Amino acid sequence: MKYLRIEDEIGYSKKRCEIRRRIEDMFLNEGFIQIEPSAFEDFSKYTLLNKRIKRESMVKVISGGSDVLILRPDITTNIIKSLIPRWQDGLKLRLFYSSTVFRSNEASNIREIRQMGAEYLGEASLDADKEVILSALKVLQSFNGRFILEMSSSKYIDGLLKEIHADEDREKQLKELIYRKNRYELINHMEDMKLSKEIYDALADIMNIQGSIEDVKAAARKHCLNEEMEEALNELEELNDFIEKEGGKSYVHYDLSMVTELDYYDGLIFKGYLPNSYRAIISGGRYDSFTEIFGKRVPAIGFSIDIDELTEIKFEEAQ
């Protein structure tokens, strides 16, 4: 962000510092330990791991040799890559970070996106999901009492796509259309796939399955084609019961068509929004299977906070 007046820039920096300090205190009080991630990733390895992030959006750096590196586009990959090869059985870690990710746009301008986030590693139960969701709710509520937390489970869409037996490219196309909420193109794409009526109806209806947990269960049950899709609904129902006991049910909206840019989640996924902002302030989910790429399957769940977006919200809206 550019400023004409020094006073405005100093005011913005002061607000951002206060926001970081408030969130840092919350994480420390909940037993999270701060970690400092590396700034660089290997370009070829990262593009294999995160196939939905466009290559042209990555900021490339040439090392002293011939290797091509990138400035980290996300922090979770960086942390997991560092920790999982050294992981010991029985270890449980609550970590948080305050750092920057880098993206390039069409004009070749580099964006520095300031983030904070939390990662809970080593706990596979729904109790960990509940703890992380509660932390996300607390962060949102500490800035505004009129927030929305969108929740879903990637198991529902993943279970449905398994019934299609699509190859990797076809699955990527379908997820991209769902991610963009482009129902018209999705239907056109499905017409050429010779799907059974049950699979066609489930995929065609996916963007309509949203609302309260009661609405979602009523709409989604009729489309459940396997245990994975059933498991997604059961886990969301249990999480909803927990959120209701914590007094947060009125803030939660469920959307089973939710697909994230970082397509490595394999369970709970969620996004948090505040008034006067169209971008997600919080994004996160469970990503156990992603850790396997680095040599060992470790239970993992976490979320990131867009500090820049949070700072740009008007002062009176962030009380």
Image (cartoon, rainbow, N blue to C red):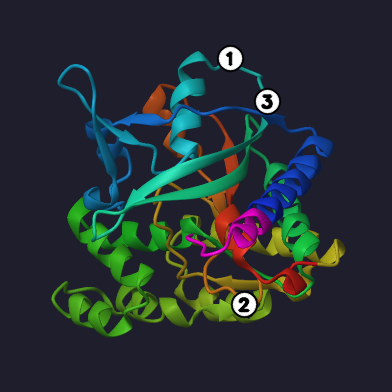
Q: Please, what is the three-letter code of the amino acid marked with disc 3? A: Lys
Nearest-to-viewer mark from 2 and 3: 2
Residue underneath mark 1? 88
Instruction: Pinpoint residue 142: horizontal percent, then vertical percent.
Output: 80, 60
Name the residue nearer the viewer: 298 or 28: 28
Q: Please, what is the three-letter code of the amino acid marked with disc 2? A: Asn
Residue underneath mark 3? 92
Residue underneath mark 2? 276
Q: Secondary structure at mark 3?
A: loop
* Mark sitting earlier along the chain (2/3): 3
Residue 269 is at least partly visible in this image: no
Figure quadrant of the C terminus: bottom right
Image height of 106 relative to 13, above or below: below
* Spatial separation of the CA atoms under disc 2 and disc 1: 44 Å
Nearest-to-viewer mark from 2 and 1: 2
In the drawing, does residue 281 fall left or right of residue 198? right
State which region is magenta. Answer: 1-12
Disc 2 crowd, CA 10 A, few/some/many (<14, 14-19, 20+): few
Instruction: Pinpoint residue 294: horizontal percent, then vertical percent.
Output: 40, 25
Residue 99, numbered circle: none
Name which quarter of the figure residue 163 lies in.
bottom left
Q: For the point 70% across and 42% down, which residue is it?
A: 128
